[in-house]
Amino acid sequence: MPIANIAAYKFVSIVEPGDWLSPLTERCNELELKGTIVLATEGINLFLAGTKAQIDDFLNYLANEPLFGGRFCELDVKYSWSENQPFKRMVVRVAREIITMRHPLIKPEGARAPVVDAPTLKTWLDRGHDDEGRPIVLMDTRNAFEVAMGTFAGAIDFDIERFSEFPDAVARACADQELNLKDKTIVSFCTGGIRCEKAALYLKEINVNNVYQLDGGILRYFEEAGGAHWGGECFVFDERVAVDPALQPTKKYYEGRTLGEKVAKLD
């Protein structure tokens, strides 16, 4: 397929994110890329689409432009492919957070929570426990409409409308004696890794032990482990609406298109 779709983020301190708006916008327009880039003092979050050559050119620019000081030479990029351009325009904007959680004590640019890669998680789920014999609890950090499209078998979700509701919802769940999360291994997951990274850090902050984030999120899991233990589709933030475990678009211009356009602001 001719169009490369990438999702990527990085938590890194940016003192004046507004200074980056013009150069990023100009470069994206020069390359005829479309999508969304969100900048904040805590880092960068992006969904972009274009030809593979255009995407490679932009990633090389990010890694080598002196303004960015090499901050993005190790940007973790997830790829998928489509026949058509799934975005209508290019938007570069500044926000308070690159993903809105509204929990100021979380500083992901300082230190990452422990990660588990996709093949390891699949192994744990195959046998029903982690390497130390603890049961696995999968924790879906996404919004309710995303969960409704597809999720891991047996995953906990919190029926939230936006990620800023997650801290209160998960704190209540951790206090629920029936769930008994204390002696289990919790793996938080999301679409591309950004929400589950913040979620895992929050869980560590409220003294929940044995917490991991799924490295690269669902998209990386599909890439490296396929659809094992997954049911349904994965919502993506563009006009493809959703992809299957083979990372192929599954719902092209259907009733959810309006929904896709509504949430493309990455809240």
Image (spheres, rainbow, N blue to C red):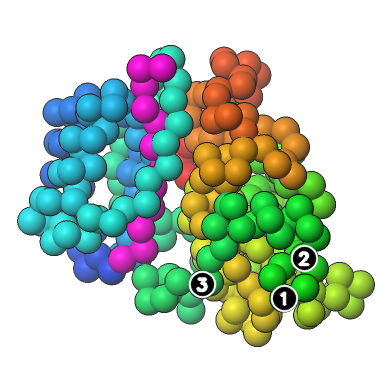
**Which residue bears the numbered disc 1?**
132
**Which residue bears the numbered disc 3?**
113
Q: What element carries label 2?
A: loop
Closer to us: 213 or 140: 213
CA gap, disc 3 and disc 1:
19 Å
The residue under label 2 is which amino acid type?
His
The residue under label 3 is which amino acid type?
Ala
Q: Give the range drawn in magenta.
A: 1-12
Q: Is residue 186 above or below residue 224?
A: below
Q: Can residue 44 be seen in this view?
A: no
Q: In this view, does 77 lie above or below 87?
A: below
The residue carrying pointer 1 sits among few (fewer than 14), some (14 to 19) or many (20 or more) residues within 10 Å by Cα, namely: few
Q: How many labels does the image show?
A: 3
* 6 in magenta: yes
Q: Residue furthest bottom?
A: 207
Earlier residue among tags 3 and 1: 3
Q: Which residue is drawn at 25% across and 65% down?
A: 14
Q: Which residue lies furthest to the left in this view?
A: 66
Image quadrant holding the N terminus, namely top left
Q: Nearer the viewer, mark 3 or mark 1?
A: 1
CA gap, disc 2 and disc 1:
8 Å
* 99 in magenta: no
The residue carrying pointer 2 sits among few (fewer than 14), some (14 to 19) or many (20 or more) residues within 10 Å by Cα, namely: some
Say if mark 2 contacts mark 1, CB within 8 Å: yes
Residue 129 disc label: 2
